[in-house]
Amino acid sequence: MLTVENLRVVYHDVISVLNGMSLEVRDGEILVIIGANGAGKTTLLRSIAGMIDFYDGDILEGDIKMDGVSIKGLDATDIMKRYNLTYVIEDRPIFWYLTMEENLGAASFSRWDSKVKTDIARVYEYFPVIKQLSNRKAGYASGGEQQMLAIGMALMTKPKVLLLDEPSLGLAPLITEELFNIIQRLNQSGITIMLVEQNAHAALQIGSRGYVMEMGRVVLDGQARELLNNEDVREFYLGSGKRERKSYKDAKRYKRRKRWL
Ligand SMILES: Nc1ncnc2c1ncn2[C@@H]1O[C@H](COP(=O)(O)OP(=O)(O)OP(=O)(O)O)[C@@H](O)[C@H]1O
Ligand SMILES: [Mg+2]
């Protein structure tokens, strides 16, 4: 469905962040991307969603395709409208001074139809907490509620593909679990999901397949279950490997080993 082919992306003409990044997102799956801070996960999502220019980045090489057609260079609104691809950025993109419900209304700006109320009701089915707080200013909501609102706003655009950048950031474990259950239900309703996460364990549990990114490229990929059981993934991303406390030297060796995969 969505393919990223050998992508090379730099910021400010010099800072090279993606170095030959390739992946595919299959129709109907939850694809999980994990990787250390600075690996280039957010840059990848920005590139796919047509927002890289906004951050002073450029795609120098490679291509991004939806069903075989290049979407590289289209702007974010075009990509959202033509391909129903919606990107929820990491920083909880909500309007603080609007109420929860006004935020949902504002998010339907890209729509032509007048069924906004029906769609707000649908968002409330997924996120009852937003309904409870519908008249409260979004700025007063907790981190978890704001994240749910941000995803609710994305649903107002009727996405077929949803890109989520670390939705669990700063959330308590129970809220993360609730949020991930909802993400799974959204996927079951037919939305293909690309999920970037630091919380590798929770993400791989609901994911279909996963990629591990390091220094702007893929070092490992497989079925989510395989990755959950992979010894290196367990050690470096799940914190539950067999080995004793790892030294920096071990980490370097790991990186070298992975690059040859
Ligand atoms: N607008 C920008 N201008 C210059 N450098 C940037 C910009 N945005 C990101 N970078 C740099 O690109 C690298 C990759 O950043 P990116 O945000 O894609 O990583 P990430 O994998 O999402 O990390 P994290 O897990 O911390 O969110 C980092 O070194 C970062 O400092
Ligand atoms: Mg990031």
Image: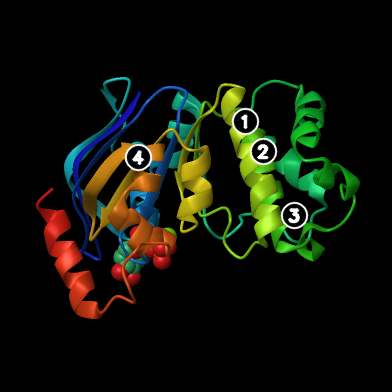
Mark 1 near ligand 2 (CB under 8 Å)?
no
Mark 3 near ligand 2 (CB under 8 Å)?
no
Residue neighbourhood size for the residue with mark 1, other residues' Cα within 10 Å, grouped as few (<14), some (14–19), many (≥20): some
**Which residue has dot 4 on it?**
226
**Which residue has dot 1 on it?**
186
**Residue type highlighted by circle 4:** Glu
Disc on the earlier residue, 1 or 3 = 3
Query: Observer-nearest residue: 162 or 58?
Result: 162
**Residue type highlighted by circle 3:** Glu
* Comparing labels 4 and 2, the label whose residue is closer to the camera: 4
59 with respect to 203 (left or right):
left
**Which residue has dot 3 on it?**
145
Relative image position of residue 126 (x, y in whole percent)? 74, 35
Relative image position of residue 132 (x, y in whole percent)? 90, 46
Q: CA distance from mark 4 to mark 1?
A: 23 Å
**Residue type highlighted by circle 2:** Ile
Disc on the earlier residue, 4 or 1 = 1
Which structural element holds mark 1? Answer: helix
Q: Is residue 110 visible?
A: no
Query: Observer-nearest residue: 253 or 69?
Result: 253
Q: Residue at x 20, y 73 (%)?
A: 250
Q: Residue at x 25, y 53 (%)?
A: 58
**Residue type highlighted by circle 1:** Leu
Question: Which quadrant would the N terminus be assigned to in this image?
Answer: top left
